[in-house]
Image: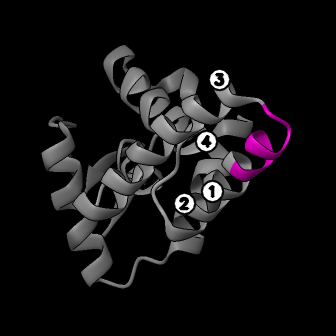
Amino acid sequence: MKLEFYESIDKFPLERFNAFNKYVMLDSELGSTVQDFDKNVIRINEFISKDMLDEAKKELLNLRFVVNNILTGNDTKGLAYASTISRIDGKPVEDYSEENLKVILKKLSDNGLTIGEVVEKIKDIKKK
């Protein structure tokens, strides 16, 4: 499978840029992994121990979203990555709905895509 990427966020079509930003923001703010779940639990405990109950309540709501992402398989890092792909095997990717991005990720995963590659590509694009 031959992939072509938008190499800079300045090159993204506007709606693709919005999708990328949405998934990057969700990933950085909420996450979608067990490790993200653990981070949220630790923050909640810290807030409670400091009697910061409003912050703990907000963090509990965030935790709910993390659990939902884990249970539904919403991999926000992966969705951000998939939104950076401009062409697959020479064909333009025009459908960047969440459902299609998940289909793309499944195919790529079946072909050996690793989380390390996903993280690295997102870092590269955010730098540019």
Q: Nearer the viewer, residue 52 or 97?
A: 52
- Label located before the other in sequence (2 or 3): 2
- Please, what is the three-letter code of the amino acid marked with disc 3? Asp
- Label located before the other in sequence (3 or 4): 4
Q: CA distance from mark 4 to mark 2?
A: 13 Å
Report the residue that reaches farthest toward the top.
Answer: 14
Q: Which mark is residue 37?
A: 2
Q: Is residue 48 magenta?
A: yes
Q: CA distance from mark 4 to mark 1?
A: 16 Å
- What residue did someone put label 3 on? 54
Write down the region rendered in magenta.
45-51
- Please, what is the three-letter code of the amino acid marked with disc 1? Val
Element type where label 3 sits in the image:
helix
Q: CA distance from mark 2 to mark 1?
A: 6 Å
Element type where label 2 sits in the image:
helix
Element type where label 1 sits in the image:
helix
- What residue did someone put label 1 on? 41
Q: Are marks 2 and 1 in contact (CB under 8 Å)?
A: yes
Element type where label 4 sits in the image:
helix
Instruction: Tell me the mark number nearer the camera, choosing from 3 and 4.
Output: 3
Q: Image point 37% across, 20% down: which residue?
A: 13
- What residue did someone put label 4 on? 28
- Please, what is the three-letter code of the amino acid marked with disc 4? Ser
Instruction: Tell me the mark number nearer the camera, choosing from 2 and 3.
Output: 3
Q: Are marks 3 and 4 in contact (CB under 8 Å)?
A: no
Q: CA distance from mark 2 to mark 3?
A: 19 Å
Residue 93 in sight in this render = no
